[in-house]
Amino acid sequence: MLSDSARRSVTTELHESLRTVIKDRLIASEVNADDITEMIISDFKSINRKDDSIDSGVRKSHVVSGFLKEVIGANYLSVFTSREILFQYEMGDKKVSFVDLLIRNLIDSIKSEVELKYYRFNFPLEQTCELFWRGLRKEVIKYLKTDTSLISSLLSTVKLLPKNSFENQVQEDVQDYGNAENRIVSGLLNYLSSNGIINVFHLEGPAYLVPSVAINPNESNNACTYLFLQSSTRRREFA
Amino acid sequence: MLPKSALELLFEHDFGNGPLFKNQIELVNELISNIRSSYYQDNDDSIEYTRLLVD
């Protein structure tokens, strides 16, 4: 969360939650908790700005192209990381992050009703496992808000899901878009989790020296692993 | 004199009763266990999803 080599999102939620916990810690102190919170948030934003100016390049090499194709075409992905993977690539005229790539590919697979790939995410902290699901939920809801056709796609995808999963509750909610949105995403995440399509492991082994993505690790003749290396001076990452 | 760095403010500076938090784990634990925090773990159902422990 606070690695000096990682970019953190300074959301209103983080800002207000940090203020809350700092106030609790400084309750008996004369120091103004609001001032301390603002100083911390200001430093976070300042670090992010530095990262933006240093890390304006986008990877275009054939290695990146091969990596993207392999991620999209994989049947099974296993990710080992202790922090956010900053890697970005170009899609059309937009920069897209590795996280966007995974979510977009998952959503596209659901929409086109192709067989979903399997994902295994490995994190060293239990808290990261919980925050992963929270983040995924938030990102999928964001997609629902920007792509109104997705709700109907998900509804049509329901037929791919086991009977009595969330078909009934979705049908009840279609009149109430906001409620349907939350429940569809909850149902979808439950489906992905309970069917082992997305597994999150709290793995305490020494596997986090650098973030890595194993592609088809279950296929001995079709497996490969990409490591995300980072320059010690330029804070750049590449696969 | 207060430090300007977020890391120093959060984990190093003595506010009279020690640093605000011992480390990042303590900070994250506080964020997900404080009922008034947006990250309070009962505010969503993530705990119901798969969370496997590998020894």
Image: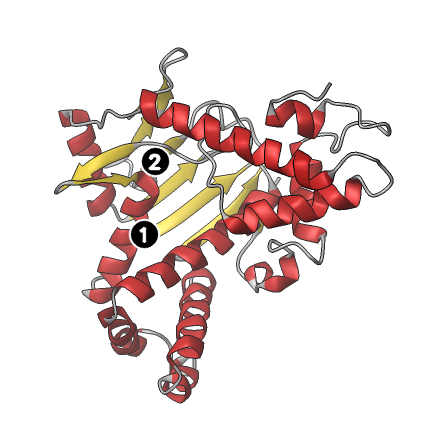
Q: Position of residue A137 (x, y in %)?
A: 44, 59
Q: Give the answer, above or below, for where A217 lies relative to A233.
A: below
Q: Secondary structure at mark 1?
A: helix
Q: Secondary structure at mark 2?
A: strand
Amino acid at pointer 1: Ile
Q: Give the answer, above or below, for where B35 lies relative to B15.
A: below
Q: In which quadrant will I find the C terminus of chain A?
A: top left
Q: Earlier in the sequence, mark 1 or mark 2?
A: 1
Q: Is residue A119 left or right of residue A206?
A: left
Q: Residue at x 25, y 70 (%)?
A: A148
Q: Position of residue A122 (x, y in %)?
A: 48, 40
Chain letter belonging to callout 2: A
Q: Position of residue A213 (x, y in %)?
A: 35, 35
Chain letter belonging to callout 1: A
Query: Which residue is under mark 2?
Result: A214
Q: Position of residue A174 (x, y in %)?
A: 35, 84
Q: In which quadrant will I find the N terminus of chain A?
A: top right
Q: Give the answer, above or below, for where A199 lies relative to A230.
A: below
- The residue lying toward the viewer, choosing from A236 and A78, is A236
| Measured Cα–Cα span from mark 1 to mark 2 | 17 Å
Which residue extends farthest top? A233
Amino acid at pointer 2: Ala
Q: Can the viewer see residue A26 in this picture?
A: yes
The number of discs equals: 2
Asked if badge 1 and badge 2 are on a common chain, one would say: yes
Give the colour scheme shown.
secondary structure
Instruction: Say the numbered circle drawn on residue A147.
Output: none
Q: Residue at x 65, y 54 (%)?
A: B37
Query: Which residue is under mark 1?
Result: A103
Q: Can the viewer see residue A116 in this picture?
A: no
